[in-house]
């Protein structure tokens, strides 16, 4: 099983390749959209590259919980409810949702994912 | 002018790979005018040829039921110009596929020498996005595949030669009730 440092190094390589960024830009704290400039189509590319690099399968809903964010049971007036937050935490235990919890607007969710989150997600998959 | 950048398929195995050729002729405007005095096939049109073959490889995997578009050129390395009077031998291999899209890796060889390496990613448009229904008229797509000799060489997922596809025969029964296929 790869170590956390090895996972970070491989994720970094994937993101450099997929997004055309320099490796020193890919820090654990960097957000994929704001800091690294990822666009929606890049996420599909990143998923393909991660699957290949780590030999894992990544179901769409695991990285992109659209079903929760568009469910009226979990979202009211564009804000994720306490039940919705609980569901997101259950779905994405590897993601740091603390900033999002402070202002849980659906529109803020898009830029949530960091490189560190991605590494923790992969770590959970490969060490499952 | 028809936007065909592969002359014909020479091999097609569903879910695996496709091979084809592109002859480069001085009569083609894009070849003659791209770099006046030094005619060669522009690299972007080699990518386009690979995208046509790769798009068909991906679309065929889903029996032409997905709205496949080229989403990203992951890598494109050209080792030599594609000069007039030569033939490029393209090979496109399906790398990964899932419900949202697919990736292919491809090569171009000229006289047995590696000429280009290109990786592409395709995505599938959600139904209703941009336009309703298929991106191609099924008859046009089938006609293009026939011109490119796809049906002459293709082997489908079950290993059958001369495959047929329901989606390419959207209206197989004509107004008079006669089968047009």
Image (cartoon, coloured by chain):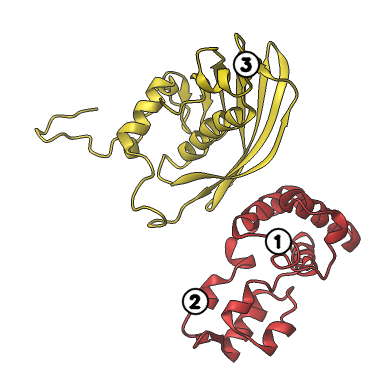
Q: Residue at x 63, y 85 (%)?
A: A104
Q: Are marks 2 and 3 on the same chain?
A: no
Q: Which chain is red?
A: A
In front of the other: label 2 or label 3?
Answer: 3
- Alpha carbon separation for disc pair 3 and 1: 38 Å
For the residues labelled 3 and 1, say whether their Cβ atoms are less than 8 Å apart.
Answer: no
* Residue A114 drawn at (x, y percent): 75, 69
Chain letter behind tag 3: B
Q: Left or right of B1: which side holds B42?
A: right
Chain letter behind tag 1: A
Q: Nearer the viewer, residue B110 or B162?
A: B110
Label 3 Cα crowd, 10 Å radius (few <14 / some 14-19 / many 20+)? many
Q: Which chain is yellow?
A: B
Q: Which residue is mark 1?
A: A37
SS label for mark 1: loop
Q: Earlier in the sequence, mark 2 or mark 1?
A: 1
In front of the other: label 3 or label 1?
Answer: 3
Q: Which residue is mark 2?
A: A70
Quadrant where the N terminus of chain A is found in the figure: bottom right
Q: Are marks 3 and 1 on the same chain?
A: no
Q: Quadrant of residue A38?
A: bottom right
Residue B39 disc label:
3
Residue A8: in sight, yes or no?
A: yes
């Amino acid at each position: 099983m790869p170590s956390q440092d090895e996972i970070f190094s491989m994720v970094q390589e994937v993101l450099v390749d997929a997004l055309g960024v320099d490796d020193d830009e890919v820090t654990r704290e960097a957000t994929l959209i704001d800091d690294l400039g990822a666009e929606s189509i890049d996420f599909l590319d990143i998923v393909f590259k991660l699957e290949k690099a780590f030999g894992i399968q990544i179901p769409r809903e695991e990285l992109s919980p659209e079903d929760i964010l568009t469910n009226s049971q979990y979202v009211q007036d564009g804000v994720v409810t306490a039940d919705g937050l609980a569901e997101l935490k259950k779905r994405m235990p590897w993601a740091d949702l603390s900033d999002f919890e402070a202002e849980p607007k659906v529109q803020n969710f898009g830029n949530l994912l960091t490189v560190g989150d991605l590494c923790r997600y992969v770590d959970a998959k490969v060490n499952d | 002018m028809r936007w065909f950048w592969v002359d014909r398929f020479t091999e097609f195995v569903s879910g695996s790979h496709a091979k084809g050729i592109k002859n480069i002729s001085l009569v083609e405007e894009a070849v003659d005018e791209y770099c006046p005095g030094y005619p060669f096939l522009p690299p972007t049109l080699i990518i386009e040829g690979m995208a046509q073959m790769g798009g068909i490889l991906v679309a065929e995997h889903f029996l032409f039921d997905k709205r496949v578009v080229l989403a990203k050129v992951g890598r494109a390395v050209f080792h030599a110009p594609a000069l007039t009077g030569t033939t490029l031998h393209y090979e496109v291999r399906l790398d990964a596929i899932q419900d949202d899209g697919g990736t292919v890796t491809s090569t171009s060889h000229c006289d047995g020498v590696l000429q280009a390496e290109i990786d592409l990613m395709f995505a599938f448009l959600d139904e209703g996005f941009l336009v309703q229904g298929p991106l191609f008229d099924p008859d046009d797509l089938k006609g293009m595949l026939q011109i490119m000799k796809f049906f002459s060489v293709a082997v489908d997922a079950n290993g059958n030669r001369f495959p047929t596809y329901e989606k390419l025969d959207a209206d197989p029964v004509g107004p008079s009730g006669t089968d047009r296929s």
